[in-house]
Amino acid sequence: MEEQEARLLSPGLLAYIGDSIYEVMARDYLLKKGYRSLNELHQYTVKIVNASAQAKALRKLEASLSKKELSIVRRGRNYKGGNIPANSSVIDYRMSTGLEALFGYHYLSGNYERLDFIWEKIVEVLFEE
């Protein structure tokens, strides 16, 4: 898909696919780090993919995003679809939707190097502090 075509998709659709990509990248990361117990993998995955962790990562990441990327994040953040989980604040949920929209945009556009760069920054924020 061309970048322009991906950018024209609704932020809900971008976040829908981005949520899946983010989770796959989290699981892949944990497997490569040596986690082998399914229970342990699940617990660490949940810690990485929850709205609070995603919002924290986005806050730290925003300064390294381009204007185009910030626009996509903003569209995702302002998207009013979906149900906010009981264990998440509205602000964290909206921010996580923005991050997921960014992941969806880069994935659908074929910007895998940029997606990997963003993921590496997220790993630094969530694991290296």
Image (cartoon, rainbow, N blue to C red):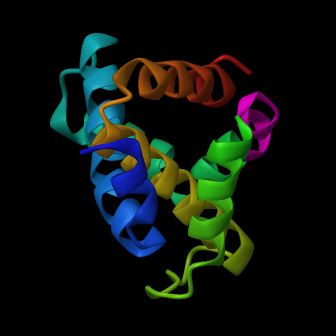
Q: Is residue 62 magenta?
A: yes
- Left/right placement of residue 34 relative to residue 105 reads left
Looking at the image, can residue 43 be seen?
no
Q: Position of residue 2 (x, y in %)?
A: 31, 43
Looking at the image, can residue 60 be seen?
yes
Quarter the N terminus occupies:
top left
**What are the residue bounds of the magenta stretch?**
59-65
Closer-to-camera residue (123/110): 110
Q: Give the total number of marks visible in the rendering.
A: 0
Residue at horizontal 49%, vertical 80%? 85
Q: Is residue 40 above or below residue 56?
A: above
Q: Position of residue 109 (x, y in %)?
A: 33, 40
Residue at horizontal 54%, vertical 84%? 86
Residue at horizontal 26%, vertical 38%? 24
Closer-to-camera residue (45/81): 81
- Left/right placement of residue 65 relative to residue 41 reads right
Q: Position of residue 98 (x, y in %)?
A: 58, 60
Give the main secondary structure, helix, strand or loop, of the magenta stretch: helix
Q: Position of residue 55 (x, y in %)?
A: 67, 53
- Tell me the quarter of the picture where residue 111 sits: top left
Q: Is residue 44 magenta?
A: no
Residue at horizontal 52%, vertical 19%? 117
Q: Is residue 125 above or below residue 79?
A: above
Quarter the C terminus occupies:
top right
- Left/right placement of residue 93 relative to residue 36 reads right
- Tell me the quarter of the picture where residue 122 sits: top right
